[in-house]
Amino acid sequence: MFSSLKVRNFRIYWFGMFVSLIGTWIQATAQSWLVFQLTDSAFLLGLTGFLSYIPVFLFSLFAGLLADRFNKKNILIFTQSVFMLLAFLLAVLTQLKLITAAQVMLIAFLNGVVMAFDAPSRQAMVVELAGKEKLFNAVALSSLAFNSSRVLGPSLAGMLVAVIGMSGCFYVNGVSFLAIIIALFLIRLDNNAKVVKNKKLFEDLKEGLIFIKSHQLILALIIMVGVVSLFGTSYVMLMPVFAKEVLKVGFKGLGFLMSCIGIGALIGGLLLARLGNFQYKGRLLIITALIFSVSLVLFSISKNYLLSLFILAISGGASVMAISIINIVLQTESSDEFRGRVMSVFMLTFAGIMPFGNLIAGSLASIVGVSWTLLINGAICTALFFIINLLYPQIRNIR
């Protein structure tokens, strides 16, 4: 289950990333509550989510070119350092009671710009840290770190706000980035390839897009990610509204709702790591994608807090298994030369399209309410996954 942690570079990176991600989820939970507290608006909550991810849509393809051209480790040291500075800025403004919704949105946008350049290098570097033979386990454990932090972070945020306040949560996140920055300095990579150096950027971009278009399986998987991003993931952004207005459980209840998504995802990540490089990945991908979309529908109609927690756990487990399988297949199907660009398109469709989904969901929620919004999105996901399965039968045959 933990075989890739035997590799020194990946082990150091994994633990540093895990600590940093806990801080990131503490800030994400506190920030969403802060925006809703300042504005009392589902639309502005959606707008903040939009601003957090729209830079990924704008810049991730260019960032993928940089990941294929330059040292990924150095790119990550720079991006993680900027993340840290932005967290401290948010903390200081909040502590001094100077913070406004507009400032939170601006910092969210700047974080999105940094994430656009951070994510393709981070995704593509996993194979260099763990090796191709342990890639499946390494990606599964990376998802495990992300989702373990999603369990711990929101729960800690709920407790920390009562003790050290909103600003304290942001300070904690700033300090947590030191873990990944130190880990990156400790990593020794002898073969951090710089594959593409002698062509123009737009020629490289065109080659990458042609590569994706010519591989129908890669194209189909990216379309699936786009569906999840546009219609599926916005439920997380709407969670403060569900906590306050639908389930009426307050900020502490919000922490448990977010944590249950992470608990389910944690179980899903552990199961995936335990399965190893198993056969019938395609069938499991289709099953988990459909379970995820149906769980959105069920959560939208639930008015019971405990039932909602259970449904969110199912949703978290199904989504992490589906996205992790897609991530793994994309990396294994891509050649070294194109991996950075393929992962940048993956991030474009996953995080780059997400702001449009957040904006649509926030706008729709302000008109018909959050429950109807999530019901509609879940139904759309279910229908589109059926259609994709019919149009691209090769997904079912992924081994």
Image (spheres, helix red, strand yellow):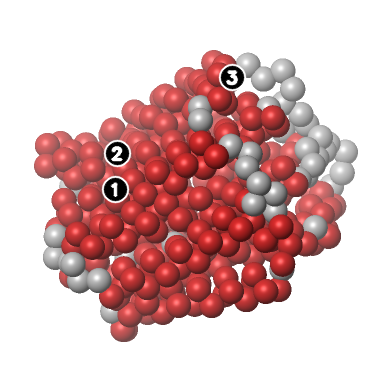
Q: Name which of mark 3 and mark 2 comes first in the sequence.
A: 3
Q: Mark 3 points at which residue?
A: 7
Residue density around tag 3, few if under 14, some if 14–19, many if 20 or more, within 10 Å: some
Drawn side of residue 140 relative to residue 392, left or right: left
Question: Residue at the right extreme?
Answer: 198
Residue 74, relative to residue 110: is it above or below? above
- Residue 194 position, x and y percent, is 78, 31
Q: Disc 2, disc 1: CB below 8 Å?
A: yes
Q: How far apart are marks 3 and 2 (CA)?
A: 25 Å
Q: How many marks?
A: 3
- Residue 395 position, x and y percent, is 68, 61
Q: Name which of mark 2 and mark 1 comes first in the sequence.
A: 2
Q: Residue at x 45, y 39 (%)?
A: 270
Q: Distance between the residues labelled 3 and 1?
A: 30 Å
- Residue 17 position, x and y percent, is 46, 31
Q: Name the residue under label 1.
A: 259
Q: Name which of mark 3 and mark 1 comes first in the sequence.
A: 3
Q: Mark 2 points at which residue?
A: 152
Q: Which amino acid does label 3 sit on?
A: Val
Q: What residue type is labelled 2?
A: Leu
Using the image as rendered, state which of residue 132 and residue 197 is in the foreground.
132
